[in-house]
C-alpha cells in the first residue's frame, strides 16, 4: 500500500490509499477546489477513485462528499449519518454502513467499527485490498480504541494532543477547563495511543501513520519519537 496524506487536522482531512492499481480515498474534508488540487498533485483523477470512506459527518471529514458523489465516486459513511445531515442528492452513489458490518467495492473489503466522538456517530475502518491482501486500520477523532485488529500492515491512527500541553494552555489562560474536557472526550492523547499500541500485535506492521495532531496541543517531533520508540516501527506524520 502507498499512503498519501492530502491534509490532516481541523482544517480538513483526506488520505489517498493506493494498492495494486486500485485507489481508495479516506475522508472528504477538504473544499472541492483544494481536494481537486491535492489529487492532481499526486496524479489521481477523480474517476480513478473506487470508493470514498467517511468516518463521520463533521465538515472537516465530510465537506466534499456531495462533490465526489456528483462526479461518480461512491461515498460510504455511517448508517446513522442520514439522520444527522441532509441526504446527498445522488443516493445511488451513497452507501450507509452498519457498525461491524462488512462491505466490498471492487478490490476493497471494508469493516466498520464504532468509535467515540463528541455525540456524533463515528466509525473506524478495517480495510483490505483483495489483490495484495494488505490490511489497514483507520481510526480518528476518538478518545480511545477498544479493538485489537489482527494482521494489520498499516495503521492510520489519531494522536491529537499531549496532556502536558493542555495543562500548559490552562495555566497560561489560553484554554478553559470545559474546552479541555471537550478535547479529551473527542480526541486521543499520546498517552492513550501508546497504551493502544502496547496491546496490539505489531508483528505484521510496516508503517504507522499518526493523524490529526493539534498545532497548539502537541509537539509533532516528540509524538513521532515516542510512538516509534514504543512500537519499534516506522512512524510517519500525516
Image: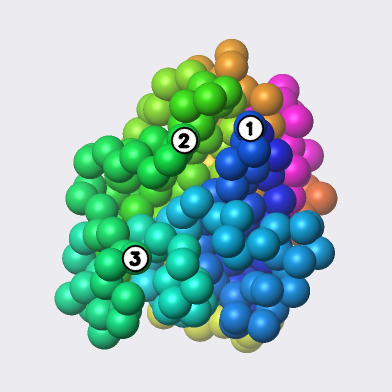
43 up-or-down from 82: above or below: above
Residue 189 in picture, x, y percent from top left: 54, 52
Tags 2 and 1 in contact by the CB under 8 Å rule?
yes
For this rendering, which residue is in front, 20 or 58? Answer: 20
Please give the range of residues in magenta.
223-238
Numbered badge on residue 93: 3
Mark 1 falls on what kind of element?
loop
62 up-or-down from 26: above or below: below
Give the left or right position of residue 137, taking residue 203 as reference.
Answer: left
Residue 130 in picture, x, y percent from top left: 47, 27
Closer to the N terminus: mark 3 or mark 2? Answer: 3
Mark 3 falls on what kind of element?
helix
Q: Which residue is mark 2?
A: 107
Q: Which image quadrant for residue 166?
A: bottom right
Q: Verify whether residue 216 appears in magenta.
A: no
Which quarter shows the N terminus? top right
Q: Residues within 10 Å of mark 1 (few under 14, many from 20)?
A: few
For this rendering, which residue is in front, 24 or 237? Answer: 24
136 up-or-down from 94: above or below: above
Q: Which residue is mark 1?
A: 20
Q: Residue at x 37, y 72 (%)?
A: 57
* Res 76 visible: yes
Amino acid at each position: 500500500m502507498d499512503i498519501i496524506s492530502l491534509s490532516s487536522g481541523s482544517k480538513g482531512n483526506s488520505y489517498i490509499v493506493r494498492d495494486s492499481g486500485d485507489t481508495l480515498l479516506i475522508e472528504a474534508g477538504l473544499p472541492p477546489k483544494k481536494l481537486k488540487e491535492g489529487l492532481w498533485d499526486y496524479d489521481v483523477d477523480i474517476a480513478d477513485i473506487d470508493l470514498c470512506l467517511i468516518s463521520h459527518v463533521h465538515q472537516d471529514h465530510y465537506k466534499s462528499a456531495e462533490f465526489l458523489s456528483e462526479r461518480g465516486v461512491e461515498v460510504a459513511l455511517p448508517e446513522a449519518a442520514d439522520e444527522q445531515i441532509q441526504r446527498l442528492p445522488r443516493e445511488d452513489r451513497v452507501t450507509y454502513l452498519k457498525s461491524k458490518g462488512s462491505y466490498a467495492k471492487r478490490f476493497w473489503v471494508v469493516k466498520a467499527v464504532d468509535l467515540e466522538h463528541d455525540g456524533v456517530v463515528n466509525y473506524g475502518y478495517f480495510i483490505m485490498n483483495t489483490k495484495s491482501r494488505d490490511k489497514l486500520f483507520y481510526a480518528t477523532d476518538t478518545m480511545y480504541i477498544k479493538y485489537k485488529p489482527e494482521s494489520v500492515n498499516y495503521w492510520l491512527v489519531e494522536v491529537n494532543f499531549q496532556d502536558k500541553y493542555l495543562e500548559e494552555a490552562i495555566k497560561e489562560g489560553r484554554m478553559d477547563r470545559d474546552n479541555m474536557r471537550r478535547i479529551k472526550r473527542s480526541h486521543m492523547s499520546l498517552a492513550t495511543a501508546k497504551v493502544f499500541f502496547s496491546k496490539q500485535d505489531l508483528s505484521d506492521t510496516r508503517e504507522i501513520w499518526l493523524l490529526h495532531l493539534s498545532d497548539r496541543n502537541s509537539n509533532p517531533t516528540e509524538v513521532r519519537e515516542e510512538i516509534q520508540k514504543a512500537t519499534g516501527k516506522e512512524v510517519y506524520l500525516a
